Image (spheres, rainbow, N blue to C red):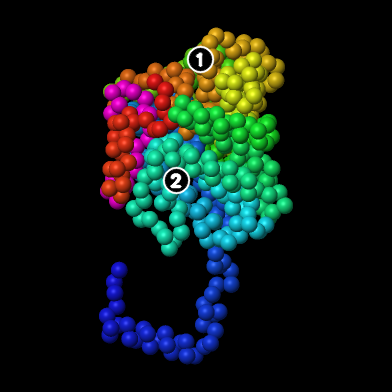
Amino acid sequence: MKRLTIKQWLPVAGLFWSITACTNNFEEINTSPTAPRNVPAEYILSQSQLSGLLAEGQNWWQVGSWMQHWASGSLSAPSQYLEDRDLYETGNWATHYELIKNLAQIRNQLLKGQETLPNGRTKLAIAKILEIFYWQRMTDFWGDIPYTQAGLQDDNLALLPKYDKQEDIYKALIADLDAAIGQLNANDVSYGNADFVYKGDVAKWRKFGNALKLRMGMRIRFADPALARKTVEEALRGPIIESNADNAAMPTVTQDGNPFGYHPIIGGYNSSKELNQLANTLVDVLQDKKDPRLPRIAEPTENSKKAGKPIYRGLGVALGNNVIINRDDYSYANNTVFNDRKATFPYYFLTFSDMAFFKAEAALLGWGGLTPAQAEGFYQAGIRATMQLQPYSIAEADIAEYIGREGKLAGTEEQQLEQIMTQKWLSLFMRHYEAYAEWRRTGYPKLKPGPNPGTTNGQIPRRGVYSSTERIRNAANYQEATSRFSNGDTYLSRVWWDKRQ
């Protein structure tokens, strides 16, 4: 910054003093009558929802290809199991920490001191629950991350924050979630229409909070079974998402001349079809099961349509840069769904189908008073709930026929878990981060890596790598954190809860 010399500063100071001497209402004159001194908490919540919730459906070229929902060919380095943290991870990291900073502003500044008052208590609780949702996504993707020293007040900022262990982060998040749920009060002032998800409905936020708690408990099932069971059983005792009417969904708008809040999959598909062809694993499973969602997800190959014999065919993942393909021999996403610039179906990010599949898993374990005999009912409910949602809207007769074929749990507990998780993987199409977390947690469905060795020796990555800026800007804390990983800051290291082989 250029500094003024004494000779330069004196005339400026003299002008300032002369102005203040001529008027006693300088501050009033120079205060905008329209610009608020503080941004309303409602605005921060709206922007955080818009920026953060739709982001869960993005990253199809990286996480979506790892989960073999999408196949990005050779155009994306991560889809080839190659690290490119400068292009991909740095922006992703910065975006998520910006979300945390903005939500922290609500508690640190805008509603500070109103923690027990009707005007602030429930607003703070909703903002905290949303923040916890983001924290879980972040630590699930990267593992150990800056947590306790992130989102602090301006007068106590940690410019070089330490990295907390994921185990400690999870325990803190569960405790904070309990506190936030307990703070919700239906008689308080809420966010109203500024809350895009539930319109400030406190009862639905309470259900969402318990649903998030159930998800967190199940996530740590194989890392800390005792805490997992306790967390799951507590969540099941509370009001929880009970039907598709309770689903957490972000509304979307058309793409026609308005890029504000359109569906992330539609946005991604229209930006580059070549990054969004469907993976062979997804298409094959849908075809093998005669799944009625297939024609709502996929388009027959262009060449088969021209030949008058339409077929569905997915593209292989991580094929390498030297494989030449004719993209017209492979299926793109359904044009009437994902190439419709006027489509406005919601983006779902925590749903009744999630709860049903979690309950099916809990029933197999005998947790929460559930029994293995109940698992099949929850399993079928999860399938039905997914198929009922847009953009599928499958007819009930077709759902019943499908469940008649695929809705029977059979075999050992492990075999039944595989059935549950395979259907869950299908239900999580378009929700890449969650599909990735659940696959790493359970090992299902069994995904075969693509042939390109990349930097993983041909293995599907187990975590995202840290932002390149952290290696430079926060080097000491970065090095301390990466030393805790078995394979350092690479795709091959596992996060704390990723215990299954």
Q: Write the residue at 38% across / 55% down.
A: 158
Q: Extreme top residue here? A: 411
Quadrant of image for the N terminus: bottom left
Callout 1: 10 Å neighbours few (<14), some, many (20+)?
A: few
Nearer to us in this view, 204 or 271: 204
Q: Comparing marks 1 and 2, which lies closer to the viewer? A: 1
Please name the amino acid that badge 2 sits on.
His
x, y percent for residue 20: 47, 87
Residue that appears at 47% across and 23% down: 442
List x then y, in percent, for residue 297: 55, 25
Spatial CA distance of label 1 from label 2 is: 35 Å
Return the x and y of residue 257 as percentages of the image width and height: 54, 46
**Magenta stretch prevailing secondary structure:** loop
Q: Residues within 10 Å of mark 2 (few under 14, many from 20)?
A: some
Residue 15 figure quarter = bottom left
Image position of 175 with respect to 223: above or below: below
Residue 189: % across, % down: 68, 55
Of marks 1 and 2, which one's residue comes earlier in the chain? Answer: 2
Q: Magenta span has 459?
A: yes
Q: In the rendered image, which quarter is residue 501 located in?
A: top left
Q: Which residue is mark 2?
A: 96
Res 444 visible: yes
Q: Depth check: give the residue in front, 124 or 92.
A: 124
In contact (CB < 8 Å): disc 1 and disc 2 = no
Instruction: Give above or below for 96 relative to 343.
Output: below
Amino acid carrying label 1: it is: Glu
Q: Residue at x 43, y 49 (%)?
A: 148
Image: magenta residue range: 455-473
Local SS, label 2: helix
Decide whether residue 232 is among the magenta residues. no
**Residue drawn where x is 45% and y is 32% of the image:** 60
Q: Which residue is mark 1?
A: 414
